[in-house]
Image (cartoon, rainbow, N blue to C red):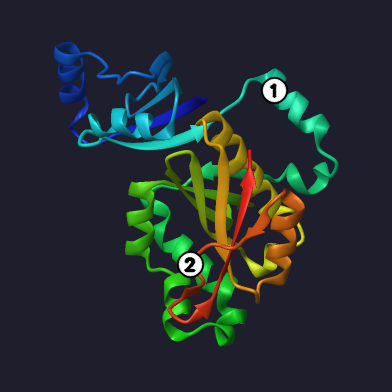
Amino acid sequence: MTYLIIEHFRPNKVKALYHRFAEKGRLLPEGVTYLNSWIDENVKTCYQLMESESLEKLKLWISHWDDLADFEIVPVINSAEAKAKVFAKSDSSNEFSIQIRIATEADCVAISKLLFQAFEAFEKDYTKGGFAATTISPEEVKSRIAKGIIWLAILNNKIVGTVSTFKNENTILIKSMAVHPDARGKKIGLQLLQQVENHAIADGAKYLYLNTTPYLKKAIRLYEKFGFEIINEPPYELFGTPLFNMRKKL
């Protein structure tokens, strides 16, 4: 998959970055390929085009440089692919305005707030522990970013949707799918699921897996429409809140 890496140089670290590059090269792990790069005129931001077999390998490369710069990761497609995608959409009026990107640590507070807003109406259906595990803190969001990928849906420069994913062998685990109440009805959940599936296929995964509560009926209908099937496997509860599990074969 192709990624645009936006690299914001930290203050007074540019020379150190160039020294490390001269001494050690790009430090690319196997499976990551450098394509091209550009730097703004003020030498504060670098835009790199990379290909990577997986996001995990890309994060490994970033770990060699994140003491000198802050990174944003943006999955990209070429113009021909974008055109095909646009004309394949049945309802472009909603989808044109939605952007999907990968979360960074700067998004942790906003994601935590969005999860609470999305699930607040269902709080009475959860146990106290189940609701707390669903509406996680910014610190827990940060931990998830370190372990997997959190995808964000952006509308009018605001985060209106989110979903967390983690790879476990040949399966992508999906958690914390949420859309802001004011942004529902715009197919944001569907677009997030499609992004997760596209990335999972590119990453070599064979299954998507999630669990949900029986109270989230609209979400369940979306999952079923997207191809998920209910499976009889644990876990069956989250701190006393009932759960059931769903899986989709890719």
Relative side of 65 to 203, left or right? left
Marks 2 and 1 close (CB-CB < 8 Å): no
Residue 199, position as x, y percentages in the image: 55, 35
What residue do we see at 55% from left, 37% from top?
200
> Mark 2: which amino acid?
Pro
The residue pinned by badge 1 equals 81
Q: Residues within 10 Å of mark 1 (few under 14, many from 20)?
A: few
Identify the secondary structure beneath mark 2. Answer: loop
Could you give the CA–CA distance between mark 2 and mark 1, rounded to whole angstroms? 39 Å
What residue do we see at 52% from left, 36% from top?
205
What residue do we see at 68% from left, 67% from top?
182
Relative side of 8 to 117, left or right? left
Q: Which mark is residue 103?
A: none
Of residues 43 and 163, the one nearer the viewer is 163
Q: Residues within 10 Å of mark 2 (few under 14, many from 20)?
A: few
Of residues 154 and 46, the one nearer the viewer is 154
> Mark 1: which amino acid?
Glu
The residue pinned by badge 2 equals 235
Relative side of 16 to 234, left or right? left
Which of the 4 image quarters holds residue 8?
top left
Vertical side of 230 occupied by 15: above or below: above
On the question of residue 135 being in view, the answer is: no
Tag nearer the camera, 2 or 1: 2
Vertical side of 83 occupied by 223: above or below: below
Vertical side of 98 occupied by 82: above or below: above
Report how many numbered discs are placed on residues in the image: 2
